[in-house]
Image (cartoon, rainbow, N blue to C red):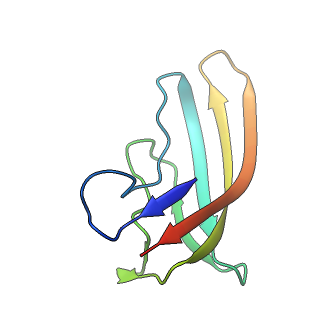
Amino acid sequence: NTINNTTNDGENDMFKVYADCIKSMQLIIYNRWGEKVFETNDITIGWDGKHKNVIMNSQVFTYSFEATLITGENVRKKGSISLIR
């Protein structure tokens, strides 16, 4: 997964969840030191590569995603995101 905010051209400018089967969710993004830089429970809100409204430098971030689907199934995912400026 990659966020590329170099051009802000609408392509890969946001890291977010796209689904219509989620009842509830939590998405947390951490920097390489384990500091939480983004968190949302709202599926309509994504991460734009900023922390406290400051543009982050290029680096690899990790994410933790947990969701409950409308079927009642629980989903947990962890991974990394490369932010490229």
**Above or below — where is 46 with respect to 48?**
above
Name the quadrant containing residue 48. bottom left
Residue 22: x and y, percent? Answer: 55, 28
Count numbered badges in the picture. 0
Q: Residue at x 46, y 23 (%)?
A: 20
**Above or below — where is 29 with respect to 85?**
above
**Above or below — where is 58 with respect to 26?**
below
Residue 84 or 50: which is nearer the viewer? 84
Residue 76: x and y, percent? Answer: 75, 41
Residue 38 or 14: which is nearer the viewer? 14
Name the quadrant containing residue 63. bottom right
Q: Residue at x 54, y 62 (%)?
A: 39
Residue 82: x and y, percent? Answer: 58, 66
- Quarter the C terminus occupies: bottom left
> Which residue is situated farthest in the left direction here?
9
Name the quadrant containing residue 74. top right
Residue 64: x and y, percent? Answer: 69, 55
Q: Is residue 56 left or right of residue 29?
A: left
Q: Is residue 40 left or right of residue 12?
A: right
Q: Residue at x 65, y 37 (%)?
A: 67
Q: Residue at x 73, y 34 (%)?
A: 75
